[in-house]
Image (cartoon, rainbow, N blue to C red):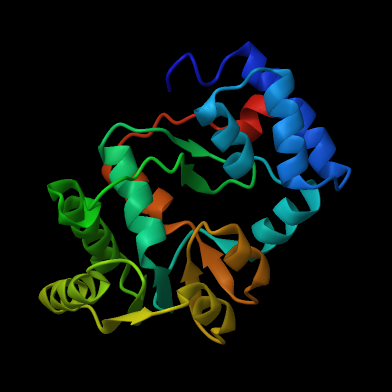
């Protein structure tokens, strides 16, 4: 990761941010206070916002997290997973948050779903799922995002080509659908879904990338320990 993002000043800011988070101060308020105090740049503020969580939330997430899918069914927050993988493939900022989930710095702009890198992200995911052998795979996509219906069709074709039982659906509020799921494993790094679901959760983007590459990513939990 670029030296202008994770440096000594950022680590001091991250420790202050983590301390204040554990005192239950509002996230947005302390993000501004800490960011302004340490003169953090945009990406540093994003890393704090998306990478540092309270200890009690971390423990609850860890208790629900699994590292293997096995023969269970899996429901995938499609854009969440594919954008993270795509950002890694593009050489953009991807990191391990202190809750152990892989996240990106939100650098996806434009119609990435039409780019070759997005197709590669799908192919890597399908190859990984084929090896894992889940009983069923369901991709959920945000209906308000342009071309989601087209992408759902592409994912259905990819599932069939990989001989994987499953489907791809669009919904105006896929987060709510994922939270309401009553069986299987949920694949996402979305904080609200991680906290609200009663099901097991898996960091699919991280597993897919680790299966294909030798990863050397900044780990905020380790850096702050």
Query: Is residue 196 shown left or right of residue 67?
Result: right
Q: Quadrant of residue 215?
A: top left
Is residue 225 something that shows in the picture?
A: no
Q: Is residue 104 above or below residue 201?
A: above
Query: Is residue 173 shown left or right of residue 210?
Result: right
* Quadrant in which the N terminus is drawn: top left
Picture coordinates of residue 206, whole percent (x, y): 42, 49
Picture coordinates of residue 113, whole percent (x, y): 22, 57
* Quadrant in which the C terminus is drawn: top right
Between residue 192 and residue 137, name the one nearer to us.
Answer: 192
Picture coordinates of residue 95, whole percent (x, y): 48, 36
Is residue 30 something that shows in the picture?
A: yes
Circle count = 0
Which residue appears at 74% of the width and 55% of the height? 57
Between residue 54 and residue 13, name the one nearer to us.
Answer: 13
Which residue appears at 54% of the width and 20% of the height? 6
Which residue appears at 26% of the width and 66% of the height? 146
Q: Is residue 86 above or below residue 19?
A: below
Query: Is residue 209 shown left or right of residue 177?
Result: left
Which residue appears at 23% of the width and 51% of the height? 112
Q: Quadrant of residue 11?
A: top right
Q: Is residue 66 above or below residue 89?
A: below
Q: Quadrant of residue 89?
A: top left
Furthest residue in direction bottom, as rendered: 182
Query: Is residue 104 shown left or right of residue 147?
Result: right
Between residue 80 and residue 215, name the one nearer to us.
Answer: 80
């Amino acid at each position: 990761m670029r030296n202008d993002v994770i440096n000594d000043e950022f680590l001091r800011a991250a420790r202050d941010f983590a301390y204040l988070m554990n005192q239950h101060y509002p996230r947005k308020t302390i993000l501004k206070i800490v960011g302004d105090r340490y003169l953090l740049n945009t990406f540093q503020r994003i890393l704090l916002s998306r990478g540092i969580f309270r200890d009690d939330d971390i423990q609850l997430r860890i208790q629900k997290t699994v590292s293997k899918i096995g023969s269970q069914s899996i429901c995938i927050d499609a854009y969440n997973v594919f954008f993270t993988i795509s950002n890694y493939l593009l050489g953009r900022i991807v990191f391990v948050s202190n809750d152990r989930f892989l996240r990106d710095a939100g650098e996806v702009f434009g119609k990435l779903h039409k780019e070759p890198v997005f197709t590669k992200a799908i192919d890597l995911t399908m190859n990984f799922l084929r090896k894992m052998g889940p009983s069923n795979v369901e991709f959920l996509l945000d209906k308000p995002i342009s071309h989601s219906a087209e992408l759902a069709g592409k994912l259905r074709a990819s599932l069939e080509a990989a001989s994987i039982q499953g489907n791809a659906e669009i919904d105006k509020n896929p987060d709510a659908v994922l939270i309401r799921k009553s069986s299987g494993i949920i694949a996402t790094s979305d904080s609200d879904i991680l906290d609200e679901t009663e099901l097991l959760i898996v960091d699919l983007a991280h597993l897919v990338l680790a299966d294909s590459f030798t990863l050397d990513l900044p780990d905020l939990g380790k850096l702050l320990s």
